Image (tube, rainbow, N blue to C red):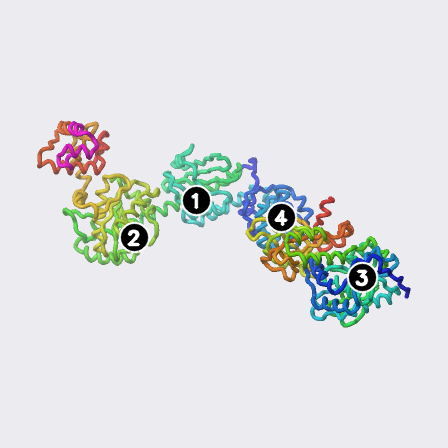
Amino acid sequence: MSAQRVTGQLTVAQLIRFGPLGSARCYSEAHLERLVTGVTLVSDLDEARQCEPKTAMVVHPVAAHGVWALEAALRCAWERNAACVVAPDSVMVRASTTQLAERLRLPLLTVADPARIALDMAVAIADTEAARARLISRCAVLFGERFSLRGIVGVINAEVPGVIAALVTKDGHLLAGRAAADTFPPDGPNAPGEDAATGGASAFAEDAAEEHRLAVAVPSADGRAWATLVARVSAPGPSWTETVETILRLARAPLASAGAGSRLSLAHQGSRDRLLMETLLGEGPTVQGRRLLPSPRAGASHGAESAVGAEELARDAGWPIDGRLVAVHLRPLQPDRDLEAASPAITAAWREDLAEAPLVPLANGWATWYTGEDAHPRAVERNVRRRLASSRIPLPLCAGVGTEGEGMAGLRRSLREAELAAGSAGGQGDQRVECYGELGPRAVLAALPVAERAVAARTLLAALLADPKAEVLLRTLTALLDCAGSTGQTATRLGVHRNTVLGRVERIRAKGIDLDSPDQRLALHVACHALLATGEARDSGRPARPR
Amino acid sequence: MNGAPAPSPATGVVHRITADDLPAVVAGHALLSSGGGGIDGLTLSVAELLRRHGPVELVPLDALPPETHCAAVGLAGGFAPLLELPPGGDESVLAVRALEERTGNRLGAVVALNSAGPNALFPIAAAASLGLPLVDCDGMGRILPLINMTTYALGGLSATPLAAVSQTGETAVLDCSTARSDRLLRGIVEASGGAMLCALYPTTVGRLRGVAIEGATSRVMRVGELLTGENRHAGLLAGLARTVGARVLASGQVTALDLPTPSAGARHFPSVPTSIVVSDPSGDGPVVRLEAQNEILLALIDGAVTAAVPDVLCLLDRQRLQPVSLENVALADHVDVLVVPAAPMWHTPQGLAMAGPRAFGFPVRHPAEEVSR
């Protein structure tokens, strides 16, 4: 900071926060943003009448004859537009005096030694630079003592007067601090995070009518862009803005470290939960020779014993695995997403209170369950739907809900059902929730590995998918098969004329698809569902992705 | 002893005070003393004296020959001892006789030291006992704590020689400067039980002209008649405005009663400071703070001095339509703060120096001084 720069004026709040008024007792906290340009020490009420505007009126004990004299001084301060009144604490300030101070919109503070405070304030006002350096050093010390994101951002919110700060992700999710700090769109003129890779702070400021926004990109531990520390500065001035910016920059390293720590801890917790869950489900039955849920690390021979031991471990870990429960399976809409990387964010976003069952990461999604009297599939479905709609979930998910079960055996069954239902929900769009109990025989189809079916189906229907109108043709074919070959019913279901259906059928036949062969019809039907479920038809216009 | 010129009471008698007038006097003196109430024992004693000696003639100052010797009569000290031991009735005779003996002048009339508070009754008792007329004037127009805080002293009259008689009949005659009189008398008063009836400011009717507050006793009676007869709030306020120029400074509820530490300037007064806050309990509206030492001395509205001693400040209960004494004021009372302007001679620079807010340790200007600045 150069000595040449224009030094701004201090506010009453700044004098309280990092100036000589730090030890003062504040009775009227409104209007602390008043600027203080000087100090007037008054030793009688006539001097109070001569108080300079915008100065802090310090009432010497000899002038403080009692509460009435303090009230008279307040009145003089108001008439002279003083910034605040500082009185000796020997005067007992009562409710009526506080009421008067609030009525006159004047900050009223009491201190033990007004004469000394007047000197200190005069020094602080004359040398605001020193006062701001003290604030910066105080924040730096406090940053070092906090280890959570909330703690570090909280230091800024608590210590820096007139500043509201928040830490937000690239997508605008609030990680810590107060949401009011970031009421501006995240992709501003200089989008946060762009400079993070180079390690440089992209501090930029936007001039609002009266407020100022500062943003500093916070990199993750590996240097990639991770989040932005934004701050709203009321009563900005060039030097004050610079001070706040320095403090924001100071907070970057502690924030990056705390963020990495919490993500590491979530990932670690996720791995442990997953291992425990896999052990719990270890001796569960398999479908078509394949375990529905991933195999335990322990050998199959002692799976039963390890499961009993795992039940104990789960209870120790606080998992509610007794009584009535309903399982939920979450899976990403695009199965090729990096689940390992997304897991901490999903786990953190899902958790609403600590008493409930954990969200356990699995190979193809996440599993959890609901317990207690409210554990009813319909209620659970509503709850899951609401949570999926939450803005904190960072990637599109769908979910399946199992039927009710009792105890560990019930949980295993319900989890399998939930996984099947989630598979069925998978093809139907973002935030889709399916209940196994309402799935019926469709569950059988859902149980088939969709991705593998889709690969086979894509080969089988390659000619059809190459058509520019592949999705329309595929939907028509599926509907025709659903309607047992009736073109009339198909037309009604699709909401088109029967001739349109006939035209499309001709086009389908032209692709070499035989609709009349009974031994091909089932396979064709399954292939159509698989393609619709994976959304393949929508991708048909683009080159096939390598598998 | 010089023979006193015979007064001519037949001319210009304002009123003949009988025992029936006492309730009005008691009610009126309460308002002019920041609400201090009457003392039943004293009232009964004076009523008995009036019945025994006949009515007292209240005469204006002009009705008496200027050479008529007169002296002020009043109680010095606290009124609390009177609650324990009502006056016997002969104290005023003893005090006046002792003063006459010291000055060698027979009194032709009695004057009130101050016609406010219980002191409004003693001159009546003295006039009745002595068979002398009571001059319708006083030296304060209110209660002030020191015997030398009078318009008499302001006008250059000497408070001494003074004769003081205790409730047990002990008599002391003081001969000293007016400035020292209160200091010396207070020592004697303390030693003799806390209250002494005094005859002081020996002078002549002629010298009283221009220095006495005329019409003081009749004013008390008019106020008393209003307070005892008027039962409508608006009517009472209008009546008080008409008779004594009273105006309502503020209205509200008593929201705080503080006992602050005495300010440096006030420590030599025989009183304990009290601070009363009258405001709107909901938090809106002005904060009215009343600083009191036996009487209300200062009124600040939102920190600005709006009324001060020597003007009389008192609280009027809005429901009972009676003055509220400082001993009886309670939180949540609905009150009007009334200000009754003091006599014009109190508003002169000399008057304010003697009995203005600065004399009581409040380093502020009286609103009258602010206007003239």
Q: State whether discs 4 and 3 lie on one chain.
A: no
Q: Which mark is residue A119?
A: none
Helix, strand or loop for the magenta stretch, by majority: helix
Is label 3 in a helix, a strand or a loop? strand
Q: Which residues are magenta?
A: A480-503
Is A484 in the magenta? yes
Residue type for callout 1: Arg
Residue behind mark 4? A74
Q: Position of residue B320 (x, y in %)?
A: 62, 58
Residue behind mark 3? B57
Chain letter for mark 3, please.
B
Is label 1 in a helix, a strand or a loop? loop
Residue behind mark 1? A178
Q: Is the residue marked by circle 2 packed among few (<14), some (14-19), or many (20+) residues within 10 Å?
A: some
Q: Is residue A299 left or right of residue B70?
A: left
Q: State whether discs 1 and 2 lie on one chain.
A: yes
